[in-house]
Structure formats: structure tokens, C-alpha cells
Image (cartoon, helix red, strand yellow):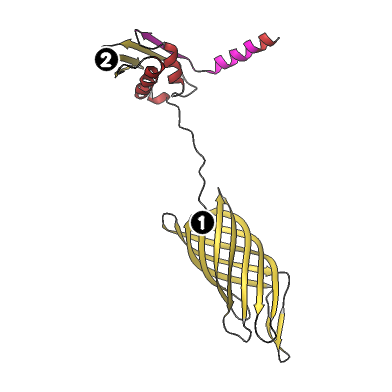
């Protein structure tokens, strides 16, 4: 039974291989060496190939598909000579050459610097660093930065952390993910708190130079919690439940 299975498997493998016939008259290598060297250079499927090799004073002459070429061997023999002849025969077998393997293309990660403002009772201006890792049409991103209130009765410093995923299509990129914003209020008795929520954004990536894009980004963060601050019994600031923001910046490939 085992012998029968081996014979069947061997027959299938032999049947799957493309037929390559080599006539090597007086060549300094065996025809099997040239068959093996040609097999790795031609497409695995297609019509049978017939190659004739004739010895010459300096090497061999190749006849294939109606064309001919003389190849000096410089004293090479055996498999080394067969590989040189197979390489020289490439232009005669141009239509049958095996296609080179297609290597996967990975887009590089990018790092961007953006400056912008978020719409609160008083705008929050700041700068963020944005690391994006694309994989095909998808992108994962991590953004961190900070800023402070622009004017208003309450002095505060705000951080921003966004972890998101999205899609890229040409110049457009769409993202959605989680948002954390630590706040430090220095007015009055002061306060420290953390706003948590989720956000979404759209980015326009305009090519400037190879590996460099200008960015225009717009989005909104929605927070699950809110904080209210008062001075002399009057409310002077309430953190927003929905905070639209706008930013511009520059992105470079890593």
C-alpha cells in the first residue's frame, strides 16, 4: 500500500511539472543540470519547452524557439556551466520567464505634529503628537498632547490622550476611538480631574514632498463626565459634554 501511494504521489508531481526537453550534444554538462536550472527561471505552466545545446570552440550554442545564441563558458563545467547557459537563454525564452514574486508592501508609520483648538466655554488651545501605523487601508493611531485655556476667568491646563483606529482612502482618513483628558485647574482652591469619553475625526492628508503630508484635521470628543467650577457663588466654567476641535499640522514618514 505504501509503495502504491508513493507511486501515485510521484506521478502527480511529475504530471504537474512543465515539460522541458534539452538536447545537449557535446556540452560540458548533463542535460538534467540545464533542465533544473531552466525550471527555476521559467513559468511553471505553459507549453513544453525544447532547447538544443551544441558545443562550440569557446562554449556552447543555444537554439530555442527559433532563436540562437552563442555562450562562452570560460572553462566552466557541470552545474555551474548549466546555470550560466540557463541565464543566457533568458532572452530566447522571454515569454516563458517566471514572474518575480510580489513582495508585500507595508506603508511606513508616520509621526505628525498638530496645533489646534477645542470649543469650550473658552477655547482650549494646544499641540499634539500623533503616531499612526497603517496596514493596507486600515490605520491604528495614538495621540498625546496638551494645552491651556485661551482667556476666561479660569486658568487650567489640559492634557489629551487619544487611542483610535480608522480607514485611509486617498487623501482622506477617518478615525474613531477612546479619549482621556486630565485637567489641572489653578484658579481658586484648584482642582484635578479626568474627563473620559470617545471621539471621532476626519483628516485631510495633502502630499507636500515624498514622505511628507500637510494635515487638516477636524473632530469632536464626547465625555461621559462633566465638571463645574464656581467663583464667588457664580458658575464660571462647565466642561463640555461634546467638544468639537480643529487642528492643522505636518506629518512625516518614519
| Residue placed most toward the observer, 50 or 134 | 134
For disc 2, the marked residue is 58
Q: Secondary structure at mark 2?
A: loop
Q: Position of residue 147 (x, y in %)?
A: 57, 74
Residue 226 to residue 253: above or below: below
**Residue placed furthest toward the front:** 75
Q: Is residue 251 magenta?
A: no
Residue located at (67% from left, 9% from top)? 4
Q: Quadrant of the N terminus?
A: top right
- With 223 as the anchor, is 39 left or right in this view? left
Residue located at (70% from left, 71% from top)? 194
Q: Position of residue 19 (x, y in %)?
A: 48, 15
- How far apart are the alpha carbons under marks 1 and 2? 57 Å
Mark 1 or 2, closer to the camera: 2
Label 1: few (<14), some or many (≥20) within 10 Å? some
Label 2: few (<14), some or many (≥20) within 10 Å? few
**Residue placed furthest toward the top:** 26
Q: Can you tell which mark lies on residue 110?
A: 1
Res 124 → quadrant: bottom right
| Residue placed most toward the observer, 243 or 114 | 114
Q: Is residue 25 magenta?
A: yes
Which stretch is magenta? Answer: 6-27
Q: Position of residue 107 (x, y in %)?
A: 51, 49
| Residue placed most toward the observer, 251 or 244 | 251
Q: Position of residue 67 (x, y in %)?
A: 32, 18
- With 83 as the anchor, is 114 left or right in this view? right
Q: Can you tell which mark lies on residue 142?
A: none
Instruction: Kindly check if marks 1 and 2 are in contact, taking CB atoms under 8 A apart as contact.
Output: no
Residue located at (65% from left, 85% from top)? 187
Residue 41 to residue 253: above or below: above
Amino acid at each position: 500500500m505504501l509503495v502504491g501511494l508513493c507511486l501515485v504521489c510521484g506521478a502527480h508531481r511529475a504530471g504537474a511539472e512543465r515539460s522541458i526537453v534539452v538536447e545537449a550534444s557535446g556540452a560540458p554538462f548533463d542535460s538534467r543540470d540545464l533542465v533544473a536550472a531552466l525550471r527555476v527561471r521559467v513559468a511553471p505552466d505553459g507549453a513544453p519547452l525544447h532547447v538544443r545545446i551544441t558545443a562550440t570552440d569557446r562554449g556552447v550554442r543555444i537554439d530555442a524557439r527559433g532563436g540562437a545564441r552563442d555562450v562562452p563558458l570560460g572553462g566552466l563545467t557541470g552545474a555551474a556551466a548549466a546555470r550560466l547557459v540557463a541565464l543566457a537563454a533568458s532572452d530566447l525564452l522571454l515569454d516563458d520567464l517566471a514572474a518575480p514574486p510580489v513582495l508585500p508592501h507595508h506603508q511606513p508609520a508616520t509621526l505628525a505634529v498638530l496645533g489646534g483648538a477645542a470649543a469650550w466655554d473658552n477655547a482650549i488651545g494646544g499641540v499634539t503628537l500623533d503616531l499612526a501605523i497603517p496596514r493596507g487601508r486600515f490605520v491604528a493611531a495614538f495621540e498625546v498632547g496638551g494645552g491651556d485655556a485661551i482667556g476666561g476667568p479660569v486658568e487650567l491646563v489640559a492634557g489629551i490622550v487619544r487611542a483610535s483606529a480608522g480607514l485611509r482612502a486617498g487623501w482622506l482618513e477617518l478615525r474613531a476611538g477612546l479619549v482621556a483628558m486630565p485637567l489641572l485647574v489653578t484658579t481658586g482652591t484648584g482642582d484635578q480631574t479626568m474627563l473620559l469619553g470617545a471621539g471621532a475625526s476626519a483628516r485631510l492628508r495633502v502630499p507636500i514632498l515624498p514622505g511628507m503630508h500637510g494635515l487638516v484635521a477636524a473632530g469632536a470628543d464626547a465625555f461621559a463626565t462633566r465638571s463645574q467650577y464656581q467663583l464667588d457663588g457664580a458658575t464660571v466654567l462647565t466642561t463640555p459634554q461634546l467638544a468639537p476641535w480643529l487642528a492643522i499640522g505636518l506629518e512625516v514618514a518614519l
